[in-house]
Image (cartoon, grey):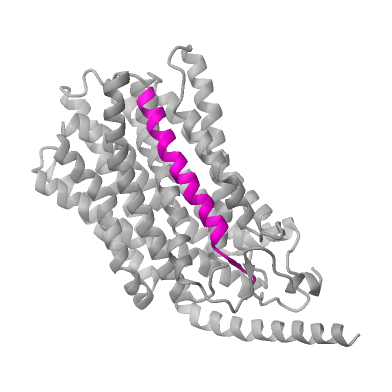
Amino acid sequence: MTREKEIRYGRGVVGPDVKVAKYERFVYPLGDGVQAVVSLFMSMYFLFYATTIMGIDPAIAGTMTLVARIFDALNDPVMGLLADRADTRFGTYRPFVIFGSWTIGASIILLFAMPAGISMTGKIIWMWVFYILENMAVTLVGIPYKGMMTHLTNDGAERVFINRNCLVYSYMFALVGAIAVPMMIGVMSNLYGEDSGMPYTISICIIMVICCTLFTLVGITVKERKFTVAKLDGGVDKPKISDSLKLLFKNKYWYIITGCALFNYFISGINTTVTLYYTNYVLKAGAILSMITMVANFGIPMLVMLIVPRYTVKWGKRKMGVIGILIAAAGMGLRLAAGMDAPVLVYTIGLFLFNGGIASYTTCQAPGMMDCIEYSEWKFGVRNDGIIMSGYLMASKAGPGLASALVGFALKMIGFDKALAATDVAMQHGIFNCAVLMPLCFLGAFFLWMLLWDLDKKQPKIRAELAERRAAVAAQMKEGQQADRII
C-alpha cells in the first residue's frame, strides 16, 4: 500500500484520532439486535416449523442443520480473509454491511415460505437450499459487521461498554421478537389455520423488512477508523492469505476464545431450541408461564448486561466468565434437583439463574476476541481483524446448529410424537433431560475450558508495548510524507 493510499480516507472512513461519537455507541449495536432476531428465528422456530408444520422427520432436519452449519462455519475464516483484504472508498468492512443486509432477510423469508403442497422430497430439498443460503448471507454480512467493531476504538474499557450495548440490544430485540412473533403468528393462524405455514411466512416477512432496514442504517451511519498497525521490522500491511492463516493457527488465544464462544452458543442453543417443546408438552404452559419463560430467556440477560460490564473491566474476563458459568450451572442444577414436577417458582428461579449466568460470560466474549487481535498485532505484527473475529460468527452458527441437531436426534431417540407428547410421561422425561441435564453436562466442560484463558494478566504489557510501536510506525509514516512533499 502506498503512502498516498495510507492517508486517503473514503466515505465513512476517518482517521485514528476521531473519537467514537455518542450516536455510534447506540447505532452500531442495532446490528447485534438484528442478528439476535435472526438467531431467534433459526434456533427457536426453524426446527419446530420444519417438524410440526411441514412434517419433516426431526432426525432429517437435525442432520441437515448439523451438516449445513458446520460446513458454513468452516467458510467463516475464508470470509474473514476476504473482508480483511477489501479496500474501497466506503472502507474495508462497511460495504458488506451496506449492500449485503437484504440477502439475509430474503433467504430467511424463503426458508419459512416452504410450499405445503410439494412432496416430502421437495420439502427437504427446499429446506437444504434456503437454509444454506441463509447461512451464507449471515456470513457475508456478519463477519464484516463484527470487523467494524475492531475499527471503532482501541480503548479496551470502551470496547467492553460498546459490547455491553451490543448485548443489551441483542437480548432486547430477541425479547421483543420472542413476544411479538408468537402474537403475530396467533393472529395469522386465525386467518389461515394453525397447521398452515402462512402465518410464519407473513410474520417473518414483516420482521425481516424492519431488521434489514436497521442493518443498512448501521452500515451507512457508523464510521470506520483507519488505525496505525504496530508492524514488526520488515512486516507488511496485509500478508498473503497463506501467511494470515498460519498466523491465525499460531494464535493460541483464538482457539481458546472461539472454543468458549462455541460452548456458549451451543448451550444457549439447546435451551432455546427445546423451549417450545418444553413449554408446550411438559409444562403445558398457559400464556403467563410462556411469557415468564421468554422473559427469563431474553429479559434477564438484558438486565444483567447493564450491570456486569463494570465488573468485567475490574475483575477480568476469565474471572467474570467463570462466575457466570457457575451461576448458570447452579440454575440448571436447581431444576434438575427439583425434577420435572418442580413448582413454577423453582422453575422460574432456575431459568433466571441459568440465563443470567450465561449473560455474565457473554460480556467477555467479543472483547476477548479483540484481545486476540491485539495479541496477534503484538506477537506477529499483523492484526488479522476479520479472520480472528470470524471465530465469533463461526461459533454463533456452529453452536446453535450443533444444538438443533443434538435436540433433533434426542427427540428421535425418545420417539417424539406431537399427538402423544402431552400425555406420554416417558416422552416428557426425555424432553426434560434435553432441557436440563444436557446443558448442565456441557456447562461442566465449558467451565474447564474457560480456565485456559490467561490473557488478562498479559494485557497491560501488551497494550503498553503496542502503544510504543504504533507511535514509532506513525512517526515513520509522517517522516515519509514530509519527504514526499519536499521531493
Residue found at the very far right of the displayed protein:
487
As for residue 224 lying within the magenta part, the answer is yes
Q: Position of residue 135 (x, y in %)?
A: 53, 39
Question: What's the magenta bit mostly, secondary-structure-wise?
Answer: helix
Q: Position of residue 12 (x, y in %)?
A: 62, 64
Q: Quadrant of residue 165 in the image?
A: bottom left
**Residue 261, above or below 403:** below
Q: Position of residue 307 (x, y in %)?
A: 28, 68
Q: Quadrant of residue 342 in the image?
A: top left
Q: Quadrant of residue 431 in the image?
A: top left
Going 54% across and 67% down the picture, which residue do you hit?
Answer: 372
Residue found at the very far left of the displayed protein:
343
Q: How many marks?
A: 0
Judged left or right of residue 226, residue 28 is left
Judged left or right of residue 389, residue 227 is right
Query: 252 or 405: which is nearer to us?
Result: 405
Q: Considering the image in quadrants, where does the C terminus appear?
A: bottom right
**Is residue 130 something that shows in the picture?**
yes
Judged left or right of residue 276, residue 143 is right
Going 49% across and 78% down the picture, which residue do you hit?
Answer: 458
Query: 331 or 24: which is nearer to us?
Result: 24
Q: Considering the image in quadrants, where does the N terminus appear?
A: bottom right
Query: 64 or 146: which is nearer to us?
Result: 146
Going 37% across and 33% down the picture, which residue do you hit?
Answer: 203
Q: Provide the residue span drawn in magenta.
A: 198-226
**Residue 157, above or below 53:** below
**Residue 108, above or below 360:** above
As for residue 189 lying within the magenta part, the answer is no
**Is residue 389 something that shows in the picture?**
no
**Residue 287, above or below 220:** above
Judged left or right of residue 17, residue 416 is left
